[in-house]
Image (cartoon, helix red, strand yellow):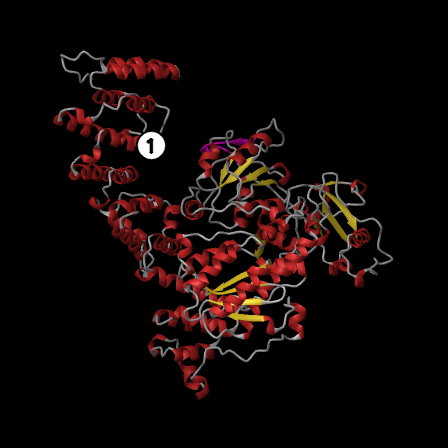
Amino acid sequence: MNHLTPDSKGLDPAVLREQLFEPWHKNDLQTLHLAAQNGFSELDNPLEAFLTILECSPSKQKARGNTLGAHLFKEFQSWLKEHPQVTLTSLPEKQAAALKHRALVLLNDTQTSFTESLIDIYQLATLDPTTLRQHVVELLNLKCYKEATVLGIKLNLQNELNMEEVCMPLIFQDKLSLAESFVTGHVHLEQQLVALLDSWCHTNFSVKDLISKRFPHLSMSRTSLAHIQPKILTKHVFRLAEKFNIDQALCPNALHKRRQDTLRFLMFKRFVDSSMTEYNWSDHVQTVVADDLELQIQLVEMLLKYGGLEKAAQWSLRYSLPRHRLPFAVWETQQSLSPELHKYACGSAHSEEWMPSEAHCQKFYQVPLAKEKVQHVDTLEALQSCSDTLLKNGGVVGVDMEWQPTFGCSSAQQVALIQLATFDTIFLLDLCANGFCQHPETIAFMRRFFAEQNVLKVGYGMAGDLKCLKSTWPQFLEKPLKLEGMLDLLNIHRKIKCGKVSREDPAEKGLSLLVQQVLGKALDKTEQMSNWKKRPLRVSQIIYAVTDAYCLLDVYSVLSANPSNFGLPSDLRSIPSQPKENGEAKQKDKKNKKMNHSSNKEECQGAQWVSPPCSDTEKGLLCGKEPPEVSPPAPMAPQQLRVVCDNMLQGLGRYLRCLGVDVVILENNDDHRVAAKLAQAEYRVILTCGQPYQTLRSQVGEGRCLSLDCSEKARDQAVRVLRHFNVRPTPCDIFSRCQACNSDQYVALPRQDMIRMLKQKGFLQAADMSMTPPEDEPLYLELPRYGPQCNWASLSDLDPVTLSFPGGAPIQLHTVPPTLVPRVPHYFVCTRCGKVFWEGSHFGRVLSMFQEVMHITDEGTE
C-alpha cells in the first residue's frame, strides 16, 4: 500500500518495508538499524509512512517483542529523537486527523509497552472524547477487557466509561490490580470500586447469578470463582479503603464480616485456647459486637455452644434481645436466673497484687525490680525526668509499645503505652493522658530519643512498633524519625532459630520463645490482648508491660556476653535484617498467594513423570499438557526425588525433607531466578506457585517446573507432590534428612558422650554435674529407624576442643535441655550444621499426618 501522492519524490514505504524485512529475517539487527535510520530520513511523510509500514508488517503479535513491528517501533522512536521537527502539527489538519484515526486503530495490534509512545507521537489524546470512548467500548464488546482498560488509562478516559463495565470482568478474571489502577486518582471511582466489592461481601450475594445476568458470555473456572468469596473480598475491601483513605464505615458488609470473624476468634481464645482472661474477653466482645443486633444474636448462639446456657442467657439479658430471636433453651434459662445474675457484669477486674505467686514465679520470667522503680510518665515534668535519665546517661534501653487490638476491623493502630526500660528504672509513657500525646515536647522527645547514637535501643519486631508510631504521630510521615542505635532482637532470634532444631513443636512463640531459649523461662502473655486504651491500667497490665520491656535487657546481656553459645557473631549489630517489602511488593506477594495463582486445586500443573529419574542420564520429566495415553509414573523412593522450593513454599519444603526428599529451600530474600540456577546445576525439579511459575518454566529444561496452589496448607501440598510423582515414603524415611540444612549425614552420640560435652562447654549446672548414665547402659547404640537411609560419620572426626565437625559447624549443645538428658539415651547430630536430634513424639505425629501416602510394610510397622 502506497500513500504517497503522484508528485511525491520520497522513498516508497513499501520499498522500505521490503528493505527492512530481509535483515530482520536474518536476525542482522545492526544492518536493520542502519537501514531503518537512513530509510526514515528518505521518506516524504515519515509519520504517515511509518503507520503504513506497521500496518503491513508481518507477525503483528501485540504480546511479543521480537517481531519486525516491535523492532521498527524502537528504531522510529530513536529516529524521532534526532528529528524533533517531525511532528503532527506540521501537517494539514485534515491529514493529521486521518493519521490519528489510523493510529487509534493500530493501538489494538501494538505491544503494550509502545502504546503510550504511539499516543504521544500521534497526539491521540486530542481526539474527540466520544470517539475515544467508542473505541474503548468496542474493545469491551470484543471481550478485550485488559486492552480496553489499559487504553482507557493511557487516554485518561476513566470518567467517560462505566466503572462496573470495565472493572467487574477484570475482577472475575483475577485482574483486580488492573481495576485498582483504572480507578486510582479518581476519588468517586475509588469509592465506587470499594462499594462494589463491599456489596459482594453480603451474605446473600451470589457471584454466579451476577455473572449470568451481567456477563453471560464470561466463562469462569472453579479457581476464579473461589477468589470471589467473602473472606478474600473482605481483605481487599479493607486494603483498598486504607489505600484510598476511605472511611471504613462506608463498607458495612466487609466490616460486619470482619467482626464476625473476630467474634469467632475471641470465642476460640477464651473457651478453646483458654489464653484470654474473662475480663479481657468480655471487654473486647463488647467493643466488637457494639450495637449490631445480628452480632449480638450470633454471640448468644456461640456462647450456647461454648460457654453454656447460663452464660448465653446472661448476655442475652444484657443486650435485651427479643424473645423470638433467641433459642428456646436460652429464653427458658433466663426465667430461672437468680436476680443477681440478671445484672451480669461481663467480667470484673479483681484486686491484684504486685508480687505474683510462687507458682507463677517458677513458671514465668520475672522482672528483678520493685514496684517503686516503675515511673508513670503522663506530664511534661515527668517527661523531663525521663529524658534526663535516658538521654544524658546513654547506655542500653529496652523499648516496647502497647496498642489496642483492632483484630483487623481498623487499619490505624495508635500506640497507647510506650515502655522504656533501663537496668534501674522503667518508664511508662502514657499516651492516653489528656493533652500529653500530641504535645510538642512529647513529639520532640521521641525524635531526640530515637536519633541519639549513644543510647542503644533494644526491641523485638520494631518494624511493627514504628508503623504504629506513624499512625499515632502523622508528623513522622511528613518528617520521618531519624533512627540511630537500633538493635532488633527479632533479627537475632531468626539467626538463632536457623541454628536450632528440635523434634518438639515449641508452645511459645515470638519474644516469649526467645526469652525461654535464652533465660530459661517464658513470658506470661495473658494480658497481651487487653484493652490498652482503658484507664486506669490494671496491675496485671502494668506488670505485663514492664516485663515485656525489661526482659529485652536481660536477653541482650546474655547474648552479648556469650554470643558463640547461640551460634551468633561477636558483634550482634552485624546480623542483617530481612529486607523490607514496600507496599507494592507486599501487595504483589499477597496477590500471588491469594488471588493470582493459575494452578488448579484439583491437580498440580506443569510437569508429568514418564519415568523415575534414577540417574542423570535417565531424565524423567516431560513438560507440557498431559496426553491421555501417559501411564501413571512408577513408584519411587523419596531419595530419588530432588527438588528446589521457592520462598513461597518453605513449609512444603520442610515437610518433604521430613519425609526424606532432597530439598533445597530458598530464603525469603532469594530471587526466584536462584531456583532456576539450582535446577540447572543440580538437575532439580522446581516447586513454585503463582506468577513465578511462568518465568521459571521458561528458564529450565522441559518439565522441570511444577506449580502448586498457594492457598493450600503445606501438608496438603506435600501430599499432592508425593502423589504426583508417585513417591512412596516409608516410616524409615521419616527424619532421614536434617530438616534445617537438608544433609543426610549424622553422627551418633550415646548419652555418656553428650553428658561429657555438656559439662565441657558449661551447659550443665552445678546441680547436674553429678549426672552419670546408668551402669548397665550399653556403650554402643543401635541406629535409629532411618539409619539405613543415611550416611553415618565417625565421632573421631569431631574436634575434641571446639566440638566442631570438619566443615566448621559446632554441635549446637545449647539446644539440649539439661532436664532432658536423663530421659534420652541416644542423640543424633547433623554433621553439616551441628543440629542435635533425639527420639520424641514428633515421629508419631508425622506418621499420622502422612498415613494416606505412607508405604508401610511389616518391617516398617514393627
Question: Is residue 282 in view from this perspective?
Answer: yes
Relative to 431, 319 lies left or right: left
Residue at x 55%, y 50% (from the top left corner): 715
Q: Residues within 10 Å of mark 1 (few under 14, many from 20)?
A: few
Q: Position of residue 87 (x, y in %)?
A: 22, 25
Please name whichever residue, 630 or 443, is drawn nearer the observer in this view of the structure: 443
Q: Is residue 839 above or below residue 259?
A: above
Q: Is residue 44 above or below residue 375?
A: above
Q: Position of residue 411 (x, y in %)?
A: 40, 58
Question: Is residue 338 in view from this perspective?
Answer: no
Please name whichever residue, 336 or 154, is drawn nearer the observer in this view of the structure: 154
For disc 1, the marked residue is: 113
Tag 1: residue type?
Ser
Relative to 469, 791 lies left or right: right
Q: Position of residue 235 (x, y in %)?
A: 39, 55
Please name whichever residue, 355 or 238, is drawn nearer the observer in this view of the structure: 355
Q: Which residue, as the protein is rendered here, is positioned at the far bottom? A: 339
Please name whichever residue, 814 or 545, is drawn nearer the observer in this view of the structure: 545
Q: Position of residue 738 (x, y in %)?
A: 66, 45
Q: In which quadrant will I find the N terminus?
A: top left
In the rendered image, residue 210 lying in the magenta stretch gets the answer: no
Which residue range is magenta in the image?
620-631
